[in-house]
């Protein structure tokens, strides 16, 4: 029987690392963690592609001329972030819904009305007139001009789908949290609504009215950074798992 190796000074030498057979449960957990992290990284890359396309659409929209709404609806296709115009002279005197919103850190509502459409496969379209703070909402919902001085121009939007944290719409109290086109149109008495909203740009309302907000402002794009983070965590997890297989032999 050989004794443990000792150093020239009589101290015991540290045990050499040895390869440990991987355990099934720890291996499966590590594999699952890596797959989840890689999946999150891939999802962020997909979001990056979507965000870059969105930013390109918004940039192109800055100088894009408007097109007749009926023509756009008839042509169909992807109408998100397309500028359109049509006539709705009594827009400011039509019934409105309140869609809860937060803009630049201020809580308030976006005021939604419905206008008739002459052709294009739809009989009406919902118009987002803009944002108003909570304390100014009642004044902004009073009827405005009897007739607008020019056609309505705005940006067509699909609207975001509600998530699991979005509150349910309170239809009976006219308080909405998500853009439910059929339900909103029904509440406003508008038949056969177009599947998109028109986010008002012009004509600007008079003082005290809602502030047109057709496109998001200051859109962040950090998806590449997030993707690198998730992929880096996956690599780190692999490193930790491999290191755990080479542990010191017990004394």
Image (cartoon, grey):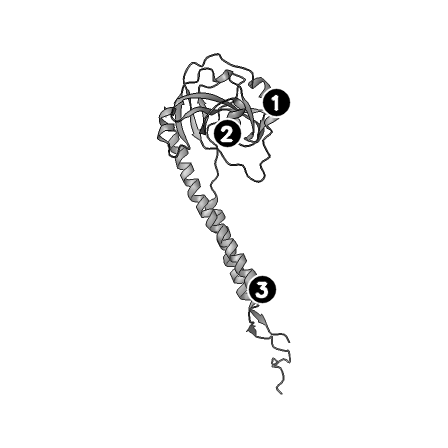
* Residue 55 vs residue 181, the one in the foreground: 181
**According to the image, label 1 marks what residue?**
135
**Sequence order check: which comes first, mark 1 or mark 2?**
1
Asked whether the viewer can see residue 63, the reply is no
Q: Secondary structure at mark 3?
A: helix
Q: Which mark is residue 25?
A: 3
Residue 64, horizontal then vertical, whole percent: 36, 28
User: Which residue is the extreme one toward the front?
Assistant: 191
- The Cα–Cα distance between marks 3 and 2, rounded to whole angstroms, is 50 Å
Of callouts 3 and 1, the N-terminal one:
3
For numbered disc 2, what is the local secondary structure? Answer: helix
Find out whether the residues at labels 3 and 2 contact each other: C-beta distance under 8 Å: no
Marks 1 and 2 in Cβ contact (< 8 Å): no
Residue 112: horizontal and vertical position, in percent? 51, 24
Residue 244 quadrant: bottom right
Image position of 64 with respect to 232: above or below: above
The residue drawn where x is 51% and y is 17% is 94
- Residue in view at x 48 percent, y 43 percent: 222
Q: Quadrant of the N terminus?
A: bottom right
User: Label 2, on which residue?
Assistant: 182
Mark toward the start of the polypeptide (3 vs 2): 3
Disc 3 or disc 2, which is closer to the eye? 2
């Amino acid at each position: 029987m050989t004794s443990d190796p000792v150093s020239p000074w009589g101290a015991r030498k540290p045990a050499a690392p040895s390869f440990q057979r991987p355990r099934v449960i720890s291996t499966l957990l590590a594999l699952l963690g890596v797959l989840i992290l890689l999946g999150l990284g891939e999802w962020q890359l997909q979001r990056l592609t979507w965000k870059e396309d969105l930013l390109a659409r918004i940039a192109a929209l800055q100088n894009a001329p408007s097109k007749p709404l009926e023509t756009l609806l008839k042509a169909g296709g992807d109408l998100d972030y397309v500028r359109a115009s049509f006539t709705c002279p009594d827009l400011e005197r039509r019934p409105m819904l309140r869609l809860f919103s937060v803009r630049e850190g201020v809580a308030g509502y976006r005021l939604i009305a419905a206008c008739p459409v002459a052709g294009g496969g739809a009989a009406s379209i919902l118009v987002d007139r803009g944002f108003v703070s909570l304390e100014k909402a009642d004044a902004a919902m009073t009827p405005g001009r009897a007739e607008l001085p020019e056609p309505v121009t705005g940006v067509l939007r699909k609207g975001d789908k509600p998530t699991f944290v979005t509150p349910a719409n309170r239809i009976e109290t006219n308080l909405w949290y998500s853009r439910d086109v059929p339900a909103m149109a029904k509440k406003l008495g508008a038949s056969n609504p177009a599947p998109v909203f028109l986010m008002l740009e012009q004509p600007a309302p008079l003082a005290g009215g809602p502030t047109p907000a057709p496109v998001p402002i200051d859109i962040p794009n950090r998806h590449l950074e997030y993707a690198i983070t998730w992929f880096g965590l996956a690599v780190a997890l692999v490193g930790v798992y491999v290191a755990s297989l080479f542990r010191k032999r017990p004394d």
